[in-house]
Amino acid sequence: MLTCPFTTHAQPFSVDYFRSPMDTPIFLSAPFGSLRDNHFHSGMDIRTNEKTGLPIYAIADGYVSRIKYASVGYGKAIYIDHPNGYTSVYGHLEQANGSIATYIKSYQYEQEQFEFDHFPGRNRLPVKKGDTIGWSGNSGTSTGPHLHFEIRDTRTEEPMHPQLFGIPAVDLFAPAFKSVHLYNLKPNRPEILLSIAAQGNKWLQTDSGYFYTDTLVVPVQTIGMAADAIDFMDNNTREYSIYGLELKIDSKRYFEFKLNRFAFDDTRCVNVHIDYPVYKQQNVRYHKLFLDDGNVISLYPFKRNRGRFVFKDTSPHLFQLTCRDFNGKSATVYLYIKSTMQGPAGTAPNGSNMAAMIYPRKSQTFSAPGFKAEFAAACLYDTLYLQYGKQIRQSGMLSDIHTLPHEWVPLHRSMGIAIQADSVSDKLKTKLLIGTFNKSGSIRSAGGGFENGWVSCKTNQFGSFFILADTISPVIKPINIAAGIVTDSLSIRIKVEDALSGICCYKGLINGRWVLFEYDAKNDLLEYFFDEHTPEAKLDIDLTVWDKKGNSSTYKTSIKRK
């Protein structure tokens, strides 16, 4: 849509203080603050052209303050503290470089583990601006090769928009609106009154933006607005999350959303920033331009009346919505809206099937025969009219199915689920966990374990819950070992899978000595790279893998290198 000017951002430091973490133009696969499942994206995802092994540079002088290697999340990640009070983060690396790599491998062999979260100290690993600290990769929970890059406030650990520090991303196109939505804010839950596609013959293009030519009439007095708005960066087809939104009513500033920084403790507020039920049903995220109760994240620099507009008359009022990208490009739409000042006040919550009323700022426990759900204070964003149901157990289950049918209600903190374990043999008690269903209806583990006659877990989603026993050991399958020969000159690759509770830990020995097998959880892969610790002669491999319920499998073989 329409491009128009936007004020430039004040830089916290000289644009020369930090350099780019890469020596190529920064093309993004995801900008800072992108809307994700249960969180705002805390960094910039920088494309590496589907390649791994590109050099990654320290953006300024400092020291390596933290190294975290994990099979999920950021994968192989390096954190650097800088003298100006900020920390840079480099995630999904393939490997570290130089003295950092040497330190990491030494630490892993000392601890005899691949995964670790370690703080080396201020003087152990100093770096200079422009040093190659590692190589881009695809480790952790990454859907493709890229660099996850962050700048955080060292004191608060809050992630900040990297472009505030003069680290630019290629952005050639303006954002656009896809749809606009009006809500009735009078009832307990916001209700959509009208939805308008931001295109078609009812829109008139002007120098100021796009005007909707019909006056919208609402039968309520208190309304709010939401928008499906997107950004385009290096082409006009690939959609990205926007940087900010602003609402003006009758030319007066009314509400603003801007993605500059936030706290990790509040990032699940993405679920109340968007219309969560619409997202769960339609897989579309609407940015709400009003604040629900319980939304505590600091992304709203201006919020008159929390974004709620109360009509005082039946005259039309001009609503102006502007979406922006970081670099100042924007799109604006205008709508005239008036109220009849009468009509339905909104649907009241249906309490006919209510099992309990759960309040957002109060610790409460709901109990039914053989079942408990525990809600800590700040678990919910708003009052919940809790419903509960129970169904007969299915084959393989060790309890009935207990259902809290509120999949469209987001949780800010995890709730506790506990189910009484009746007539379970002592030998099974250590194998018990809580099961639930995934989106496709298949059974998955929600985790937890047995204690004092109950099986309990923590979960951040509503759904159906039941007891399962995991007695099946993990499966170990060699990938590149055949007839006593490793068919690869670089590494040994072994696939490890577990059907229910998931892989917990593993131990790999070669000729009786611990060696470093790296774990790639998304590919169910263990990989040992031949290095200075690898014997030249025959290799006796002894690999044991445990799941989270203590079931184990062992794979032993003797091989020669190709």
Image (cartoon, rainbow, N blue to C red):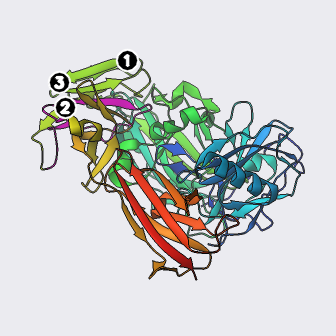
Q: Quadrant of residue 252?
A: top right
Q: Which residues are magenta?
A: 396-425
Mark 2 to mark 1: distance in Å? 25 Å
The residue under the point 73% across, 54% down is 327
Q: Position of residue 297 (x, y in %)?
A: 57, 32
Do callouts 2 and 1 mark residues in contact (Cβ within 8 Å)?
Answer: no
Task: Give x and y (percent) for residue 395.
Answer: 12, 50
- Residue 265: x percent and y percent? 56, 32
Secondary structure under tag 2 reads loop
379 to 206, vertically: above or below:
above
Magenta run includes residue 411: yes
Residue type at the position of mark 1: Ser
Measuring from the top left, give residue 38's x and y in whole percent: 47, 43
Q: Nearer the viewer, mark 3 or mark 2?
A: 2
Q: Earlier in the sequence, mark 2 or mark 1?
A: 1
User: Quarter of the image containing the N terminus?
Assistant: bottom right
- Badge 3 local density, few (<14 within 10 Å), some, or many (20+)? few
> Mark 3 sits on what residue?
368
Q: Is residue 339 above or below residue 520?
A: above
Residue 395 shown in magenta: no
Mark 1 and mark 3 in contact (Cβ < 8 Å)?
no
Q: Is residue 403 left or right of residue 67?
A: left
Q: Quadrant of the C terminus?
A: bottom right
- Check disc 2 and give the amino acid type: Ala
